[in-house]
Amino acid sequence: MKASRKELIIASATKRFAHFGFSKTTMHEIAEDLHITKANLYYYYPDKLSLMKDVILSISEKVHLHEKEIIEEGGSVLAIISKILSHRREMNIKYCMLQLSENLEMIKGLELEEVIQVINARDESSIEQILSTGIAVGELQNIDVKDVARTLLDVISGLNFLCNIADIFKGLPNPNNDSLILEKQMKATVLIYNGIKN
Amino acid sequence: MKASRKELIIASATKRFAHFGFSKTTMHEIAEDLHITKANLYYYYPDKLSLMKDVILSISEKVHLHEKEIIEEGGSVLAIISKILSHRREMNIKYCMLQLSENLEMIKGLELEEVIQVINARDESSIEQILSTGIAVGELQNIDVKDVARTLLDVISGLNFLCNIADIFKGLPNPNNDSLILEKQMKATVLIYNGIKN
DNA sequence: TTTTGAACTTTCATTAAAAAAAGTCAAAAG
DNA sequence: CTTTTGACTTTTTTTAATGAAAGTTCAAAA
């Protein structure tokens, strides 16, 4: 059926995108990998952008599901967020080209806003859930969950940008940065946590 | 004397750089503004980069002096940082092209590292002084001043990047962003403050 | 319904020539 | 001796033209 065919395309495209980035991957190459023609690929996806979007959303979904698992495993608020940040670093190392490309395309004004919004919503829902549970079990003060979650996410992704900006611009991955980013993110998270814990 | 002549050059160059950015300002134009020849300008500055550096350092010094004044005026830690962040936003609106250019040049690999280091050192010294005083008067816990100051500065400049990245890339200023940046920076600062206050 | 070959259109890479800007220097001016 | 300059060279940026590559479309075949 159609859905399964699309899933194959996404899986195949993800490999190329993750390795070479969006701009260095052609529709022809993606089609070749699947032993179909470019025209056939266009039967399933009207353009490259929508394929890119589906690939991004697919990865985001995987990450989100894994984060849900981490949350369900339980633990202190700080421990859970720490696990999530570590996992995101791992994902970033795995899909770094894609991250760089994604950021660059977004910067260039490509219509990825909707996708970014979905990812943001997922991120917010995860953090909000962690904070809400923290309040429920008395670990955290009775804070404004939405507001703190948004600020924490801004801080985390701001630090990501701060350390990655040069690489994003160059379009070259730099895995060395990841431990530094994680460290800075953890330090900031701990400081914020200290202010909201009971 | 030489010093005064250089100061005139810096003042004049600052106007052009602040308005059009580094790349859209030529040495010829700067010379013209001063009613001297380009060759004469090169008598005082060996190249464009060193003039750029002096302009950046001169503005940074002004900002730093003003922040010292704010600190000396006294007040709560949060009030002082709030004033500093507001002042930085004002400076950013005034010198936005310069900020954008500076970031872009840095990204492109221009040798502005030394200058950035000086600015960082000044920023750190300000925040460290605020935190130290806060501890001394019992407003803050006995935290690791250097560490917290660095993290706070990372968070603040990360948020700046996060909101500005598209504009930095385009090279176009966008003053609308400034209130948003300030808001995010204040929210993050308050959260961190809550964790270090007594 | 799915697939394809053969188009078309847009974007990208390359090149060469011209223009603009950066940077140099010997000599003039004070 | 310091400062200034005009004329010069070198680098960088722009422009325009070309061909190639990639994105996209579509009528017809499977």
Image: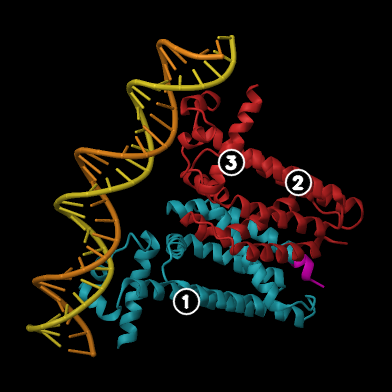
Chain colours: A cyan, B red, C orange, D yellow
Q: Is residue A34 above or below residue A97?
A: below
Residue at mark 2 = B66
Q: Are marks 3 and 2 on the same chain?
A: yes
Q: Which mark is residue A114?
A: 1
Q: Nearer the viewer, residue B106 or B22?
A: B22
Q: Distance of mark 2 from mark 1, alpha carbons?
A: 42 Å
Residue drawn at the location 34% of the way across and 70% of the way down: A13
Q: Distance of mark 3 from mark 2, alpha carbons?
A: 18 Å
Q: Are marks 3 and 1 on the same chain?
A: no
Residue at mark 3 = B14
Q: Main secondary structure of the magenta part?
A: helix
Q: Nearer the viewer, mark 3 or mark 1?
A: 3
What residue span does the magenta drawing correspond to? A193-198
Q: Is residue A172 above or below residue B179?
A: above
Report x, y in % for residue A83: 62, 68
Q: Nearer the viewer, residue A151 or D2?
A: D2
Q: CB of mark 2 within 8 Å of CB of mark 1?
A: no
- What type is the residue that disc 3 sits on? Thr
Q: How many marks?
A: 3
Report x, y in % for residue D9: 33, 23
Q: Nearer the viewer, mark 3 or mark 2?
A: 3
